[in-house]
Image (cartoon, rainbow, N blue to C red):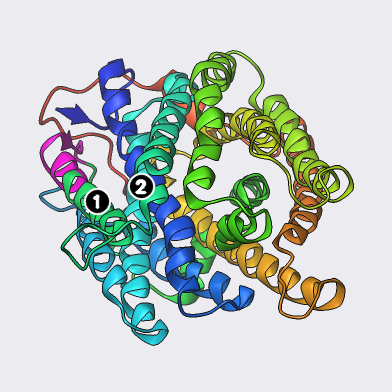
Amino acid sequence: MISTQQKRVPWSWVIMIAMPAMVLQILEAVSQGALSFTIRKFTNDALTITCIGSSAMLFNFVISPYIAWKSDRIWTRLGRRRPFLILGLIGAAVGLFFIPLAPTLLALILPVMFFSFFFEIAFYGTYDPLINEVVPVPQRGRHGAIKALFHNFGTLYYSIFLIGNFDFFFAGTPFKGEHIIYWVAAVLCLMMVLHFTFNFRETYVAPPATKQRFTPWGFARDLFGEHQWRMVYLLVFIQISLQAGLANLGPLMVTEQFGLSKQVMGMISVPMNISKIFISLPLAGFLADRVDRMKMLLFGVIGSTLYPIAYWLFVHLIAHGHPTYWQIVFFEIYNGFVDVMANIALAALFFDFIPRQRMGTIFAGMTFARGFMRLFASVGVGVWVKYYSRLFSKPGINDYSSGLLFLFLFGVIGIVLTLYVYRERAKGKIIEYGRLETEAAPEPVEEGMPAVSSAKL
């Protein structure tokens, strides 16, 4: 059984703790891909589509940060992280079941919000703190590569077997591929409930001796009161500058603007993910535990920022608005390579700077920052596309590709912040607590023995 707080863990544990990332990626793909087409049945307004599709990010400001913060301060029979993770997965499954059954746009909003609420609790509340309590610092770089591998398996499964069948009706039934996509995702959530229930054990950590009452001011002070944590949150902005895409408008750019089918759109990511699995991820995993992660991050951020501006120029100056399948694939492979390099470095860097006792609390701040930036990026690209199209496109036509210009500007800010964090670490203003804890840690505790108290939280 997988246990937390060990000085070194078997690689089989690392694989098992990374497995849920496949489900996480499928849920992300469903919420940005399939949900885009579900919403599109009721409206073609770019801003409305991105706002509904980005509803999960609203909960990053309230629910997920509080859950992560609270998980540092409780202990239950299931541990301190898993209860929230299990509850979130069950709730997400319920929301997914009802989304394809909604008859109107108004009726659709309720199950989407329900799914988003519990999805955030599960994967953006306590999953990452649990991961990093299991995987020690010396193994986190390679764990990041393994986790990313499962992310890519999730994308491949979604792209090959799910999204291409969105409009396919099953003979003799009122159901079509749209229903199956959401219901498969719901079943996968329930499978992960069993995984976290029976395959994990959290090593005991005593809650604080003095119970800390939640207050908005105290909560904000815990999250943002120290320079160290604010630097971690800048890393979150950098991560979003890497991951930010066209959100729910991306699938519409490929199908409506470029004129490709959903089946072809689904296959675009296949070569990219294969290249990640066999080239990018092994290389990134090898480098992440052997080179300076900040330098690796800077390389990836610069490369990622060049992607949207190069793609936009190619689409409008060379492809005349209609790139071919293989031209799109080329840009996706390049973007996948540089993003992998940066994200693998980031995955380890985040928790290199956070002591074990503060993982939930600082992850709460990370979740808050991530939610704010994701919402800004997603709604921002929707606003940009809507008003850029009004100015430069024919009436009623959305230029979804114009969002690439917004992403380029976002990436430039990411480069500036990466250089700033790099300088702060060079000056010794950021401490690698995680690495220091691992080097000073005693040998692994025996089964059932209590671990270090967190009374100083």
Circle 1 — which element?
helix
Left or right relative to 376: residue 173: left
What is the crowding at mark 1: few (fewer than 14 residues within 10 Å), some, or many (at least 20)?
some
Q: Nearer the viewer, residue 259 or 424?
A: 259
Label 2, label 1: how far apart the Cα atoms are = 9 Å
Quadrant hosting residue 186: bottom left
Q: Nearer the viewer, residue 420 or 239?
A: 239
Counting the numbered discs, the total is 2
Q: Nearer the viewer, residue 121 or 104?
A: 104
Q: Where is residue 282 in the image (x, y as percent from the top left)?
A: 52, 16
- Identify the mark nearer the N-term, 2 or 1: 2
Dot 2 and dot 1 residues touching (CB under 8 Å): yes
Residue 208 appearing in the image: no
Query: Is residue 304 shown in magenta?
Result: no
Left or right relative to 251: residue 112: left
Q: Position of residue 181 (x, y in %)?
A: 31, 54
* Residue under the image location 47 percent in, 75 percent down: 216
Q: Mark 1 points at which residue?
A: 184
Observer-side mark, 2 or 1, equals 2
Identified by mark 2, the residue type is Leu
Q: Nearer the viewer, residue 58 or 399?
A: 399
Q: Mark 2 points at which residue?
A: 162
* Residue under the image location 63 percent in, 70 percent down: 379
- Relative to 271, residue 248 above or below: below
- Relative to 343, residue 244 above or below: below
Quadrant hosting residue 380: bottom right
Stretch of the chain drawn in magenta: 192-204
- Relative to 61, residue 412 above or below: above
Query: Is residue 196 shown in magenta?
Result: yes
Q: Position of residue 456 (x, y in %)?
A: 38, 49
